[in-house]
Image (cartoon, rainbow, N blue to C red):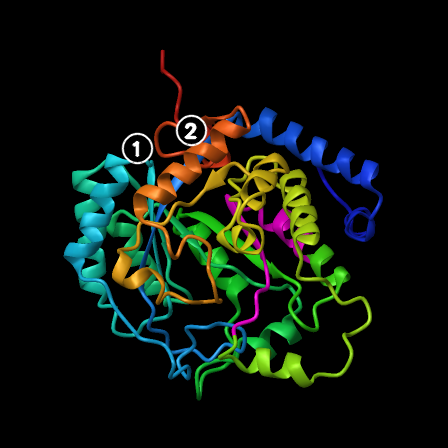
Amino acid sequence: MSLTFDQILSWLQEDDGPRLDSLWQEADRVRREQVGEEVHLRGLLEISNYCDRACQYCGIRQPNVHLDRYRMTPEEIRAGADEAVARGYGTVVLQAGEDPALDLSVLCDVIRRIKNETPLAVTLSLGERTVAELAACRRAGADRYLLRFETSNRELLEHLHPPRAGDPPTHRLDLLRVLDELEYEVGSGVMVGLPGQTLADLARDVLLFQQLDLDMIGIGPYIPHPHTPLFQKLRTADPPCAGQATADELTTYKMMALARLACPQANIPSTTALATVNPQAGPLLGLARGANVLMPNLTPAPYRRRYEIYPHKAGSERTSAESANAALEQVLALGRQVGCGRGDSVKRRMRCRATVPGPTE
């Protein structure tokens, strides 16, 4: 379904319960028809909390001296992939800050080993990388890459996500196009309720999802971290800007439902941030309003609480087994089923079938 700016903005401004029920029902119908009843589980491994950026909103920003840093070894990453297989997950997600010491050759070797020795799809979420690095990881076998553009408001993004010292501003949309050219499944997404972000900005975000025709879309509420400049500014800031988007569940659900309508075949997770603001009902409501993916955490216990992009992250106190059981309970509570296999992008599968030559006479 092609959405217009006015349609999207109208839904984002809607507060009538029955009207919103119709939005949730439509998003769920499109989800069911386009990607089915399966909920795909992606095992999350947070492999490093080092980062050389100074984003104003993120708890693992390089200037945060309060954070105990870590970097998983190749053996630990490989063990996490084995656990993903044992738990029946179809994908392992390797996530990190922009860690300059995350050796490319070692990373590519780990990716090759996972691909050669397991049936898993490998998703990378490692921030902004050079074209050469992205190409090397793709050659090693990485299947997907998640790089959120965070907000389509360019001025706001450059304020909150400054470049490295001496570097020009990075254009993440250019990197998303590179990822598509490298034939990754491409994921992106936004935070909801960043200070200075308006409902009109969120409407433009959904239009950008539609324009990019994404394979994966991640959406979560902005959660302030106490050891960031943005948190400090919130304590002393002037009144919110006109039309300020609220960092709440309802707006997040609206964005997820609209993302489903804009990109019917995308894989959309019910995110950890959503589960953080509502641990009991958040994941279930996300799945009922357009989402079809959950991401149980497989990060080893000594590291899990230290990957603190925001405080009190859902699942940080759970074991891998508890995270797996919680995900299963959420799927079954909705009468859905756990997905089998890798859960590849429907759009990509259709594209591949379309390019396979038919039999010749």
> Of residues 308 and 145, which is closer to you in this image?
308
Tell me where residue 336 appears, x and y as whole percent. Answer: 51, 25
Kindly identify which residue carries mark 1: 88
Q: Secondary structure at mark 1?
A: loop
In the image, which disc is placed on residue 277?
A: none
> Of residues 112 and 74, which is closer to you in this image?
74
Q: How many marks?
A: 2
> Which kind of residue does numbered mark 1 sit on?
Gly
Task: Examine the image and state in which quarter residue 262 appears.
Answer: top right
Residue in view at x 60 percent, y 72 percent: 157
Circles 1 and 2: CB atoms closer than 8 Å: yes
Q: Secondary structure at mark 2?
A: strand
* 209 falls in the magenta region: yes
Magenta part of the chain: 205-225
> Vertically, is 205 above or below 82?
below
Kindly identify which residue carries mark 2: 338
* 355 falls in the magenta region: no
Split into 4 quadrants, where in the image is the C terminus? top left
Residue in view at x 49 percent, y 56 percent: 177
Q: CA distance from mark 1 to mark 2?
A: 9 Å
| In this rendering, position of residue 64 left or right of residue 215 | left
> Which kind of residue does numbered mark 2 sit on?
Val
Asked whether residue 193 is in view, the answer is: yes
Residue in view at x 76 percent, y 35 percent: 21
| In this rendering, position of residue 42 left or right of residue 175 | left
> Vertically, is 215 above or below 248?
above
> Of residues 62 and 16, which is closer to you in this image?
16
